[in-house]
Image: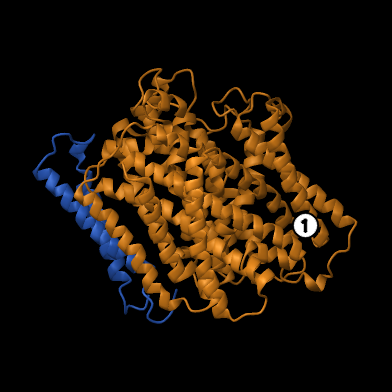
Chain colours: A orange, B blue
Amino acid sequence: MQAITFLAPSPALLLQAAPQRLLHLSSVDLAIVVLYFIAVLSIGFYLKKYTLTGEDFFLAGREMTAWVAGLSFLAANLGSLELMGWAGASYQYGILAAHWYWVGAIPAMVFLGIVMIPFYYISKTHSVPGYLKLRYGEPARALSAVSFGFMTVLMSGINMYSMALVLKVVLGWNITTSIWVSSLTVALYVTLGGLLSAIFNEVLQFVLIWLGALLISIIGLIEAGGWNGMVARIHHNFPAQDFTHMWRTMGSFTDNPMGVHWVGIVFGLGVFISMGYWTTDFLVVQRVIAAKDLRSAKLAPLIGAAFKMCVPFIVILPGLLGLALLDTPGHHFLMPEAQAVATGGHSYNEVLPIMLARYCGPGLMGLGITALIAGFMSGMAGNVSAFATVWTYDIYRAVFRKEATDSHYVAVGRWCTILGVLVSIGTAYLVMHFKSIMDYVQALFSFFIAPLFGTVLLGMLWKRATPKGGFWGLLIGTASSISMYAWVTIDHSALRYIALSPDAKDMAENMFRALWSGLICIAVTVIVSLFTEPKPESELVGLVYGCTEIPSEGHLPLWQRPIFWAGVILAVFVTLQIIFW
Amino acid sequence: MHRPGMLSIWFFIGILLLAYGMLILGAGLYELANPPEHPVVLANLHAGIWWGALLVILGLIYSLKFKPGRGN
């Protein structure tokens, strides 16, 4: 969910296609769902007494172990739309969808853990905009904070509406009831326990997502006759198309169903979009800087990366199993959204609940549905806790009330949480009536990702980057991304310039737009910096490479050093690319 | 995470998995005794029974290992 949503096929609109509910819950299933709501609320009430200071509420007391921070870091991203959207994408495009889990995440997570986390952690910043304030000054912070806060809460509303649609289609639940029950539950437990409560629940949700979704892949592989049996069935069904290789069809835009090229995947997705999201989106970074010490903070993204590499097993594999088991030679059982709307059939994005219904009887069905609801709530809690922190520290305290007691800011944070949820609910209803807003807001969110990465990266690694350079690089990088989007929207033939091919599709456009806007941001930052006054080095201590003493880990045994595990993860990552080449 | 008296998140997870495991195992055993009219695909694997049992075992391990007072 969250920022990655803009990469996924938009599932919400299409899910309206289904003519009737897909699944029916038994009393055992309902008991499992109700128990889940009781558990998350109980955790919120229990943790309230441990959430006394601003550090507790906004940064979970900076006491998280590497495992808790790492699983929470991943869970905040692992929303239900992420699960359903990418399962649908893998049914539509095959294993190519796994690029968004591997090249689109693993290098960035390792880079965050090894290169960037020391600066976030040692600077003691409470947020990414807070780091920009320390490094570049107030204008860069203000630009980043306002855009992040605004977009986060809008995205939260859009995801909320999409999830309500999913529950309506899958279970026949009323949209308004789904929106209010789920969002008020999240509001309650985050308001009570702040980030501490959000993180605790995210770890719980992470476990439930895996246990609820894993069974589909296991039984599906048994039915298909293992991996080889599944591949053989897919080739039998679609002999003219390659759904099971990741790189060999990437040489041309026209050779693969996604219409993407390896340059866009590697540099657009792997460098700017992925790095931008995983290293500068405060939604995920907040979980890591809540770690109890620097070593834990460095290990947390690596633990997240290890599990992220496994996520295709519960997301991509069900889509591939759908291609093998639901389809017949030359014929897809599931169809594009527009066709599903017209014919009353099922769309690609319903592949996960359809596979759930195929294998899961009473009890297991409830666990699977709980996994979807848990995914939604972990994503939403991530949004609102990050929103509350940025608005309280980077907007309210910076603009409205610079000097106040810690308890005052905690109270503001609690009100911001409630406000964020209410605005999200409002956005959900707005989207319900004006569905094109969804596309625009998702695009808007994407505008800030790639340029922000350029700004933060130069800030951390280049002493010469100046406050004016950082601000203008971020502003012009963002403006260039918006301009490219507008250009292609007005004149579709402009795609040949933005994505380097008239055959490129939407995803390719996203990737190339990110690539260009990131490069423009870096170029502007460098040029402006060379003509403006840099900060003295004494003000860059703890913020920039070369001015910051990073504690050595040389005294630790090899297996306890983050750099060792980073190497292991990258080796597994490369091996996976070769296996599925 | 290690404040005096605070329950571990793993304890919460253990308790919930234990409850889920018992419910799913019970539903699986009931289906074994009373086969449904329209069974799911590969119902002969009785996934509810072994998946429920797995959750019970995981739940027991986590709730005992991280139970209050063990200093975890």
Residue A59 appears in the figure: no
Q: Split into 4 quadrants, where in the image is the C terminus of chain A? A: top right
Residue A382 position, x and y percent, is: 50, 58
Check the image and name the residue furthest to the left.
B33
Above or below, B9 against A172 in this view is: below
Residue A347 lies in what quarter of the image?
Answer: top left
Above or below, A252 against A389 in this view is: above
Check the image and name the residue furthest to the right.
A531
Circle 1 residue:
A471
Report whether A258 appears left or right of A350: right
Tell which of B57 and A571 is nearer to you.
B57
Q: Secondary structure at mark 1?
A: helix
Amino acid on which the number 1 mark rests in the picture: Phe
Packing grade of label 1 (10 A; few <14, some 14-19, many >=20) is: many
Above or below, A488 against A66 in this view is: above
Residue A273 position, x and y percent, is: 63, 45
* Residue at 41% from the left image edge and 36% from the top image edge: A15
Tell which of A429 and A568 is nearer to you.
A429
Tell which of B3 and A176 is nearer to you.
A176
Report whether B38 appears left or right of A563: left
* Residue at 41% from the left image edge and 65% from the top image edge: A188
Q: Chain of mark 1?
A: A
Residue A149 position, x and y percent, is: 60, 58
Report whether A327 appears left or right of B45: right
Residue A422 appears in the figure: yes
Residue A471 lies in what quarter of the image?
Answer: bottom right
* Residue at 24% from the left image edge and 34% from the top image edge: B41
Residue A151 position, x and y percent, is: 59, 52
Report whether A316 appears left or right of A440: left
